[in-house]
Structure formats: structure tokens, C-alpha cells
Amino acid sequence: MSTEHSESMPSAQRLAEELSAFDDRIAILESEVRAGAGETGLPGLVDETIGIVNGLLCAYATHAGKPMPVSDDPLQVFKVFVKGDPSLNAIRDNVRELVYYRNCLAEGRADALPTNPALMTAHTARHIYLYLRTRCAQEQRLP
């Protein structure tokens, strides 16, 4: 999307388009998992999912007027995301779960992961997306 188009578009429309793009990315991850974990395997899936979650958090928070850090660390992003609205803690454990998966893989401890961690990773991304999408709808942030 061009910058000119993005700046002239109402923020609710921009948020809706961002959420739709994240929905599409999650659907691709889900189909890759069903087909056998995708091209990059579990570490790539977890990294991609963390990127999607960071994007979701930033899209919502930006629309809500929160300044967001530029960080690949989902816990840092989440810390700013939830500030001022404790009800957003509803997805805290989901974010932590993804960080746990990444840490287990980095330490060579795939044995500490749950059964079918690829499926759990995709489900966690979908859960966070649905929570934020529903919240946006309830808060009338979408067109």
C-alpha cells in the first residue's frame, strides 16, 4: 500500500485492512501446519507467529493512540500494549507461550514443548487475532 493512500485513508479502514492482512498470514500458517509445518520448520513458524502477534498488538495499540516501541521482543511490545488498560492482559499468557516456545527451541529443548507445538503455535496466533478483532468490533474501531 502506498504511503499517500495510507495517510488519506481513515484510521478505522486502515486498521481493518491491517487486521485482514494478519488474518491472511495466519491462514497461510495454519495451512502450512496442516501440510506438515511449512518451509522453515517449527523455529521459523514460531518466529513468524511472534512477528504476526507483534504486528497485531501494534496495529491495535496504534489505533488506540498508544506509542509503541520498535522491538522484536513480544514481551516488551506487550508491556506497552497493556499499559493503561489491564483488561488487555487477557492475552498475556498467549504471548508468553510463544516466547516459551522460542526459548525452548533456542536452548535445544524441543522435548519441553507440548504435543504438536506447530499446531499450538498456529492456534495461539489465531486466538490472539480473534480476541483483538472482536475487541476492535466491540469498541467500534472498525468501519
Image (tube, rainbow, N blue to C red):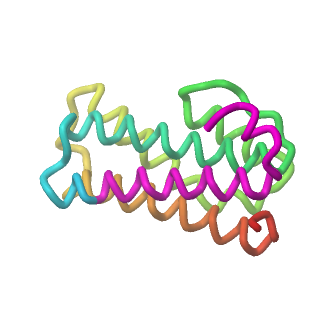
Q: Residue at x 59, y 53 (%)?
A: 92
The image shows residue 54 at horizontal and vertical percentages of 57, 40
- Dividing the picture into quarters, in which one does residue 43 lie? top left
Q: Quadrant of the C terminus?
A: bottom right
Q: Residue at x 82, y 55 (%)?
A: 85
Q: Is residue 1 left or right of residue 100?
A: right
| 69 or 83, nearer to the observer | 69
> Residue 10's x, y, as percent?
82, 52
Q: Give the prevailing secondary structure in the magenta stretch.
A: helix
Horizontal and vertical percent position of residue 19: 59, 56
Part of the protein shown in magenta: 1-30
Residue 58 in the image, given as x and y percentages of width and height: 67, 41
Residue 134 among those drawn in magenta:
no
In the image, residue 40 above or below residue 32: above
Picture layout, residue 49 above or below residue 117: above
Tally the numbered discs. Answer: 0
Identify which residue is drawn at 39% across, 38% down.
48
| 40 on left or right of 81 | left
Closer to the camera in the image, 53 or 1: 1
Q: Is residue 9 magenta?
A: yes
Q: Is residue 89 above or below residue 71?
A: below
What residue appears at the point 66 percent right and 24 percent down from the top-left corner?
A: 70
Specify the quadrant of the image occupied by residue 13. bottom right
Q: Residue furthest bottom?
A: 138
Left or right for 2, reference 99 = right
Q: In the picture, which quadrant includes the N terminus?
A: top right
| 66 with respect to 56 (left or right) | right
Closer to the camera, 114 or 134?
A: 134
Residue 40 picture quarter: top left
